[in-house]
Image (spheres, grey):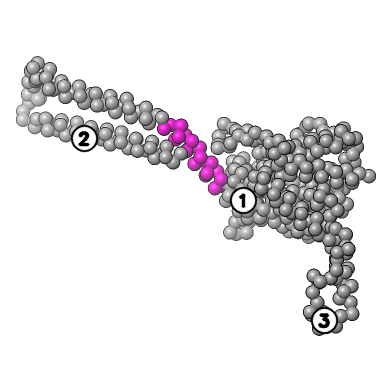
């Protein structure tokens, strides 16, 4: 694109230079041929001035004039097509430059301001990798309960599970009962439609690829499956400290305590994936199902897994997807997510807020002015995976079905 732009500029400058030279030459010749005013207007009238003879007009004068005309035709006939050939590149560069400006504006909106304003980075991290933020819990009547630290999910995978319209909806209307406010004017927030567009444009630049996300999940799940139940570990360590002298306590090394017999913190891959990030803040819980389906999960005080919170309870999921066929139906649903107003399972009705975990959603190109530079992307497949592989989603589904009561 840069080459196309430089070539186009060079051609335009050459044409401009030639036009300037021709204009200067024409003016110079006319000035030299002009007669100073020496008498009456009759003497200076063009039709009274003796002109060239026929022999002179049809000789070198005609050849010279025709040569200049031919040169002009060559400049027009060659220069303009060359200039026109660069037009697609010019338009692509204009779109790319506009998109760059949109991304830069989105980056400014995303970043926490110097004055400490609570922009996106305040809750989601400077690089969109997740962070914790203070939040005041209230009861159903809006009365104060307590202060907590709420995990803001990473946003570098948001377009692996939501399409642009779904992300726009979340930004405009927020997430109720969480630190995520309504940012868009439609939801009562301070940002315009263009601001929201710029934020989404910026987020497209920080997205992980499906392969990178799956590698993160695989590595994190392996670490989680190695962890021992923390209550058991703490009990063993405390028991080992009993009866030690002050000198022995000072030299005490908790890592030497035998905790091998303590049960694992997470009993299965599905359990680890369902709760990924709960105990260490990994990605702010962006990969976790528990963040939406377990009360208290986001601020470190989770109740029974799948008991329901922002998302519905999962303790009746077997009724929603019954039988052997229901397992695959549930896998497909978790892979793709819900569509607003579309039925799923036995009696479920989608809201569009349930993301897809192993099928990357399609992003269609737009031609309107609010979507300059958006590149079309076809929907992925379960075989390709998204944030999770299909096998990992199946492990989550098996764990969710074990929560049935």
Is residue 259 visible in the rendered structure shown here?
A: yes
Q: Are marks 3 and 2 in contact (CB under 8 Å)?
A: no
Left-right relation of 127 to 273: left
Residue 289 point in image, percent of width and height: 79, 47
Is residue 186 visible in the rendered structure shown here?
A: no
Is 219 magenta? The answer is no
Q: In the image, which disc is placed on residue 332?
A: none
Residue to which mark 1 is pinned: 110
Q: Which residue appears at 56% of the width and 45% of the height?
A: 103
Tally the marks: 3
Is 93 magenta? The answer is yes
Left-right relation of 260 to 74: right
Q: Which residue appears at 66% of the width and 39% of the height?
A: 164
Q: Are marks 1 and 3 in contact (CB under 8 Å)?
A: no
Does 266 sit above or below residue 5? below
Residue to which mark 2 is pinned: 24
Q: Which residues are magenta?
A: 86-105
> The residue tagged with tag 2: helix, strand or loop?
helix
CA neighbours of label 2 inside 10 A, class few (<14), some (14 to 19), many (20+): few
Q: Which residue appears at 67% of the width and 45% of the height?
A: 211
Front-lying residue, 335 or 256: 256
Residue to which mark 3 is pinned: 248
Q: Quadrant of residue 134?
A: bottom right
Task: Give the mark, 1 or 3, whose residue is nearer the N terminus.
Answer: 1
Task: Give the mark, 3 or 2, whose residue is nearer the N terminus.
Answer: 2
Q: Which residue appears at 26% of the width and 34% of the height?
A: 18
Per the model, the C-alpha gap separating discs 2 and 1 is 54 Å
């Amino acid at each position: 694109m840069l080459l196309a732009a430089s070539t186009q500029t060079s051609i335009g400058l050459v044409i401009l230079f030639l036009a300037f030279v021709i204009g200067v030459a024409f003016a110079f010749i006319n000035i030299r041929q002009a007669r100073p005013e020496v008498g009456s207007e009759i003497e200076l009238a063009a039709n009274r001035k003796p002109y060239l003879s026929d022999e002179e007009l049809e000789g070198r004068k005609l050849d010279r004039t025709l040569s200049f005309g031919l040169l002009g035709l060559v400049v027009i006939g060659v220069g303009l097509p060359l200039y026109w050939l660069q037009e697609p590149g010019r338009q692509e560069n204009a779109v790319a430059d506009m998109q760059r400006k949109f991304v830069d504006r989105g980056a400014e909106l995303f970043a926490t301001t110097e004055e400490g304003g609570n922009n996106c980075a305040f809750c989601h991290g400077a690089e969109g990798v997740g962070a914790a933020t203070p939040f005041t819990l209230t009861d159903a009547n809006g009365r104060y309960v307590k202060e907590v630290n709420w995990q803001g999910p990473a946003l570098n995978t948001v377009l692996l599970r939501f399409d642009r319209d779904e992300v726009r909806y979340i930004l405009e209307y927020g997430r109720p009962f969480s630190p995520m406010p309504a940012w868009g004017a439609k939801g009562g927030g301070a940002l315009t439609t263009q601001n929201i567009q710029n934020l989404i444009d910026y987020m497209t630049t920080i997205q992980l690829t499906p392969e990178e996300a799956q590698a993160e999940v695989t590595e994190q799940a392996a670490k989680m499956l190695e962890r021992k139940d923390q209550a058991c570990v703490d009990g063993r360590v405390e028991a080992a400290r009993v009866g030690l002298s002050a000198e022995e306590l000072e030299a005490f090394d908790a890592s030497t305590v035998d905790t091998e017999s303590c049960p694992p913190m997470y009993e299965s891959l599905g359990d680890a994936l369902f709760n990924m990030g709960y105990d260490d803040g990994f990605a702010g819980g962006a990969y976790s199902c528990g963040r939406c389906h377990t009360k208290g999960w986001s601020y470190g005080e989770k109740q029974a897994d799948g008991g329901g919170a922002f998302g519905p309870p999962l303790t009746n999921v077997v009724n929603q997807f019954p039988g052997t066929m229901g397992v695959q139906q549930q896998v497909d649903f978790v892979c793709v997510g819900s569509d607003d107003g579309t039925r799923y399972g036995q009696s479920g009705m989608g809201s569009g807020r349930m993301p897809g975990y192993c099928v990357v959603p399609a992003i269609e190109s737009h031609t309107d002015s609010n979507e300059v530079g958006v590149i079309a992307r076809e929907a992925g497949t379960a075989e390709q995976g998204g944030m999770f592989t299909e096998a990992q989603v199946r492990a989550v589904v098996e764990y969710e079905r074990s929560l049935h009561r």
